[in-house]
Amino acid sequence: MSLRHALLGLLSERPASGYDLLKRFETSLANVWPATQSQMYTELSKLADSGLISVTAQGPRGRKEYTLTDEGLAELRHWLTETKPQRNTRNDILLRVFFLNAITPDQARSYLTELMKLSEQEHEGLRRLADSIDWGDDPLSVNGKIALEYGLRFNAMRREWAAWATDQIRQ
Amino acid sequence: MSLRHALLGLLSERPASGYDLLKRFETSLANVWPATQSQMYTELSKLADSGLISVTAQGPRGRKEYTLTDEGLAELRHWLTETKPQRNTRNDILLRVFFLNAITPDQARSYLTELMKLSEQEHEGLRRLADSIDWGDDPLSVNGKIALEYGLRFNAMRREWAAWATDQIRQ
DNA sequence: TTGGTCATGTAATTCGTTACATGATTGA
DNA sequence: TCAATCATGTAACGAATTACATGACCAA
């Protein structure tokens, strides 16, 4: 249940409405924790009910601005320092690799070269994103850079792996 | 819904009972697609209902042996060749990185060094697994080796990244 | 005045986890 | 005979996805 913590994390930077948070998920967080509009509004209601956030302002069109409470900040810190990131990592891409013998070697190689292309595209996308951001020296920029660097290294690794793997499959 | 395809994939190698499949999930597939006993029996019933697999033998203790049907094989191949692996990849570990400014630099560095250790341990575990397996030249071994190589490279990459990231965080 | 964006919610369904529940077979 | 393993299932709940539903505000 990390959506909860993702929302607390975003609200720890500044107060925001559900709509604001939705936009920020679409941009910065979409790559690590996708969430739908539906899920977010539901979770925000629950968080408000349990006192981890509270409505501190109301705007036009029924806009509700949420602010992190002291309990919410404590919960966020607890999550960051005391709990193990043990998310079981389902991997659709790798799962298919196990069953490549159900198709022809040509098809299998084609699957792997597609993965190479995908990795290159994602790498390029991240590189462009990095260029477009005006990085400062502040803590938020540092974290963003660290996360982005992960993406770059990950895609480079995956590209090399897919190239190597293609070579392993023979007629 | 890839559990469905994981089961079809395993059954494409040879017929098996729910219990057999459960064991094979625990060993080979646990790292890429964890599933519970409960989920598997439910999914097997659904697959049988939809005609993708069928019960071809009954054993002691109510054991049911399932075999892949022609429709099932077709569905497996369709999944492998026609559908894009677009699984949105939730990443618990990276999500936390975004919020490291909510804790002290010391705590943040501690989180990242833990990640280094974790990657080293997983790398070592996979290396031992590779040693323990009697690899042949058959297609199944090739696929297993490819998947394993991914794990090794991934953990090496993550270790280096975490080391680099630790260094980025200053007082 | 009208189209785009802001803004929030509910309902239905599926997927995944945890817990509960039962019982047959086999080998030491 | 008894413990371990084999073997299958259901129930309750939570998390995630898709679709539905509504309406206010603002700028051109």
Image: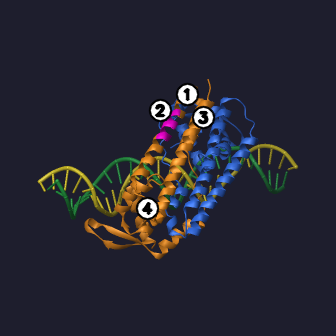
Chain colours: A blue, B orange, C green, D yellow
Which residue is at 64% across, 53% downward? A119
Chain under numbered label 3: B
Q: Quadrant of the C terminus of chain B?
A: top right
Residue B71 located left or right of residue A12: left
Determine which residue is flagged by label 3. Answer: B165
Q: CA distance from mark 4 to mark 3?
A: 39 Å
N-term-proximal mark, 1 vs 2: 1
Q: Does the magenta run of residues contain B117? A: yes
- Nearer the viewer's eye, disc 3 or disc 2? 3
Front position in the image: B97 or B152: B152
Q: Which residue is mark 2?
A: A82
B100 or A125: nearer the eye? A125
Question: Closer to the observer: label 3 or label 1?
Answer: 3
In the picture of the structure, the residue carrying the numbered disc 1 is A70
Secondary structure, mark 2, is helix
Q: Chain of mark 4?
A: B
Query: Residue placed at 30% from the left, 71% from the top?
Result: B58
**Separation of marks 4 and 2 at Cα, in angstroms:** 44 Å
- Amino acid type at circle 4 is Gly
Q: Which residues are magenta?
A: B113-120
User: Residue beneath label 4, please?
Assistant: B136
- Mark 1 is on which residue type? Asp
Q: Quadrant of residue B99?
A: top right
| Discs 4 and 1 carry the same chain letter | no
The residue nearer to you, when weighing B64 against B49, is B64
Assess whether mark 2 and mark 4 are in contact (beta carbons under 8 angstroms): no
Q: Are marks 1 and 2 on the same chain?
A: yes
